[in-house]
Image (tube, helix red, strand yellow):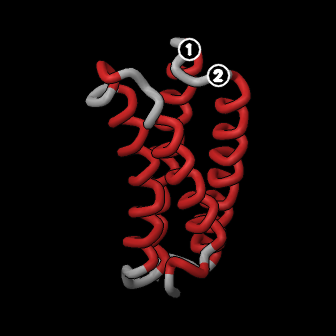
Amino acid sequence: MPYERLEAWRVSYELALAVYDVTRTFPTEERYGLASQSRRAAFSVVANIAEGSARRGPREFRRFLDIALGSLAELACALRLARDLRLIDDVSYARLDDVRNSAGKLVWGLSASMRSQGTR
């Protein structure tokens, strides 16, 4: 199953692009801090979906999807901190959080569908 066909990957990729875009405006002192951490978490989501889809069997794929879900939770925390530190405005935060929520639902749903395929 090529990962590009997965809706969970496509929405997560859209999220990663948006995170990279918004973190470009972060102050220089955050380049290796919150900006870098946010980008790593967003990239981790799409990378784990892609890597997991190339693994053999649904059990291994679910393991990578679990990691992607953890990265989405990490990103939620980073985005909230960025908003509260006024590094991003409320509108940007809401937009990013909506996409992150959508990605999370899709990744969760994909994981559930892998679970229903058994533990091969």
* Residue 35 picture location, percent across and down: 39, 32
**Any mark on residue 86, and which?**
1
Asked which secondary structure carries label 2, the reply is loop
Q: Is residue 56 left or right of residue 80?
A: left
Q: Residue furthest left?
A: 32
Q: Amino acid at mark 2?
A: Asp
**Residue visible at 51% across and 78% down?**
3
Mark 2, Cα crowd under 10 Å, few <14 / some 14-19 / many 20+, is: few
Q: Is residue 89 above or below residue 99?
A: above
Residue where numbered disc 2 is placed: 89
Q: Is residue 87 above or below residue 59?
A: above
* Residue 101 picture location, percent across and down: 68, 45
**Residue visible at 58% across and 20% down?**
83
Asked which secondary structure carries label 1, the reply is loop
Q: Is residue 30 left or right of residue 112?
A: left
Residue closest to the eye, 32 or 43: 32
**Residue visible at 62% across and 68% down?**
110
**Residue visible at 39% across and 81% down?**
54
